[in-house]
Amino acid sequence: MKLSGLVLLPLALLLTACPKVPNVDDGDNSTLTESLSQDFEISMYKDGGMIPESEKLKISKEECSWTYWRYKEETVVSWKASDEDLKGLMKLLKANSFRKIQTRKEDEVFDRGGYSITIKNDGRETVLDNSGLSFIEDKWASNFKNIKNGINDYSRTKVFENKIYLHASISKAVQESDLQIEVDFDGEMAYNSESTQINPFDGFKAFVGMNQVNLTSYYRDSVSRYNGRVIFQQDMEWLEIEKTEREILIDLVDDKLVVKKID
């Protein structure tokens, strides 16, 4: 598939919500005089290219939201940014001379994902596009990477803080099964029967809203032709979690692994 101007769009968790500001000096620090305005806004879009997923982020004084789309399902996480958060992000942008970053266009690119970042401040708008047909010039690659990583660090921390803890109850059928079982919610391990024999799971974090649930079971002690375990079941399901819910049930029904909400 050929791209034509499409802006393309992934969570490692961080200990602090404020982005780290690298020491960058491009020889011209005029950008550093720009101050944070009331209309300050960051919009970032990440497209997975051929992978059916994308992330859309908006950060402003009025609202912050992160929208995660995958396989036609969407999860939205919202929060309120503090003045300190916004100042830290503006410091990150200025330290990396965001107004000066340049891009180039290619005539033909196939199935390329990437990031596009739009920064608005004091009535001015700057677009940093490293997706589809657009490429950040080599001279500015490290500046763009610092900005992208700093914004991601901040947003991922906020998204994680807005998840809720759930407990996974295990049915008798699962406990007595000869299968090795793994269940994860959008990358958060909810249950692993092999690990729980040593360290039982205390709980895991899930989105308020739609969660992609990956269900996998293996024949215990099996070895495939590729020296891995032989898969018995590998399915993906969707489970919508509400803020008041605190527990799910992992069960085996006719040897099929299922996950249910407990009322």
Image (tube, grey):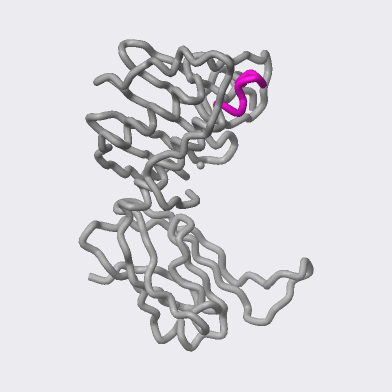
Indicate the position of residue 56 as horizontal and vertical percent values. Answer: 41, 34
Depth order, front residue of 145/68: 145
Indicate the position of residue 81 as horizontal and vertical percent values. Answer: 27, 37
Counting every numbered tag in the picture gives 0
Indicate the position of residue 165 as horizontal and vertical percent values. Answer: 32, 64
Is residue 137 magenta-colored? Answer: yes
Identity of the residue drawn at 73% across and 75% down? 223
Depth order, front residue of 147/239: 147
Q: Quadrant of the N terminus?
A: top right
Identity of the residue drawn at 49% across and 61% down? 214
Q: Which stretch appears magenta? A: 135-143
Q: Is residue 200 left or right of residue 261?
A: right
Identity of the residue drawn at 49% across and 30% down? 147
Q: Is residue 164 left or right of residue 226?
A: left
Identity of the residue drawn at 62% across and 14% down? 104
215 versus 96 height, above or below: below
Q: Is residue 112 left or right of residue 56?
A: right
Is residue 209 magenta-colored? Answer: no
162 versus 213 height, above or below: above
Q: Is residue 55 left or right of residue 48?
A: left
Indicate the position of residue 163 as horizontal and vertical percent values. Answer: 33, 55
View extreme (right): residue: 225
Q: Quadrant of the C terminus?
A: bottom left
Residue 137: quarter of image: top right
130 versus 221 height, above or below: above
